[in-house]
Amino acid sequence: MTKKSVADQIGVSAVAVGQWEAGTANPRPDNIDSLARVLDIPVAFLAAGRPYARLDAADAHFRSLRRTPVSQRDKAISFSEQIWELTYALEKRVRFPAVDLPGFSAGEVRQTDFPIDPVGAAQALRRQWELGADRIPRMVRTMEQHGIIVTLVPFAGSATATVDAFSTSKLPRPIVVLTPDRAEADVYRHRFSAAHELGHLLLHSDCVPGDTQQEREADEFAAEFLTPRAEITPLLPPRLDFKKLGELSTQWGVSVDSLLRRCKEVGAVSDATYRRAHQRLATLRASGLFIRESVQGYPGEVPALLRSAFEMAEQNGLSFKELAAELRITLPRLRLLLGQGDTRPELTLV
């Protein structure tokens, strides 16, 4: 909501709302009640004493930054702050996996002797996480097992249609937010996005949102992490062969598009052939071949850490209502943060 829309519903000026938001003035008690009603939050959400994370928009890596309006990036940042608040509350009750990300420590990434080039970093992280050289069967679950918080929820309505994915290492745990619009459309692109954000967390402690060099390095990291060059190169066809690429796509859990880029990188196809191949691929998809699959058929690619932590805490006495009260949010908002959606039945008048 804009300041003006909030102000109009409360009956004050947009300047006043801006002053409240900036902290230069406090709303009257009756305005606080109106704010809570308009914003659909408990009054307690606006009070002091709540665990509160502050994250600047410049502290997050956004994929497709140019297509993401500032207002939607702000929604994404606020969502990340609430995800950390939820994680903080659950960690008081449940022991999470330790963060196993080279150089990361409580919201800071310090320089180590870990490789800083994308390919070397991907190879080294595979060794550190003992992943071997074969396909990573569950990309998202692997990240969660090493202490990274990953979410996949429609956190801001239509905002997720343009917010592709984003991540931050500036909170006490690294957070990666993936959006269901992309995951529902293509599980392989979803896996690549997760690996891309992992690359940012590992390589780019000094975040430069939208920087083409950092985005290119994150792509290089993701490609090497998912399809190690030494392993995939001997398997790539010596000339363009979509049937073979389709088989490799299923085998390695990456898109045919990604494998085409690999063919170009290793010199198996020329630039001209690469461009024609993409045109041909679009035609084949339009005719019903190489259909993209949803993440729903791949449970290991749907985040589960936060939900599992709550279920464990719930078994030991924590209720939805108690946790929502502690976070000072509504029950539907808590369900959203946990990736459960709103379970209330939808009713209409007859």
Image (cartoon, rainbow, N blue to C red):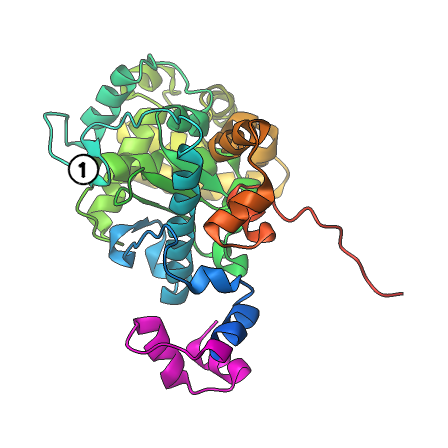
- Left or right: 341 as drawn, with respect to 265: right
Q: Which residues are magenta?
A: 1-30
Residue 286, position in %: x, y? 60, 44
Quick one: SS at disc 1?
strand
x, y percent for residue 206 = 17, 46
Secondary structure mainly formed by the magenta segment = helix
Residue on which disc 1 sits: 109
> Would you place residue 208 above or below residue 92 in this image?
below
Camera sees residue 293: no
Q: Residue visible at 44% across and 28% down?
A: 94
Decide whether residue 10 is among the magenta residues. yes
Instruction: Name the amino acid type tagged 1.
Output: Val
Residue in view at x 25 percent, y 17 percent: 128
Residue 144 screen position, x and y as percent: 41, 28
Q: Residue at x 48, y 46 (%)?
A: 179
Direction from residue 146 to residue 122 in the image, left or right: left
Q: Which one is nearer the viewer's eye here, 223 or 269? A: 223
Nearest the eye: 43 or 145: 43
In the rendered image, the quadrant that contains the C terminus is: bottom right
Of 48 and 286, nearer the camera is: 48
Apparent side of residue 176 relative to residue 39 in the rendered image (left or right): left
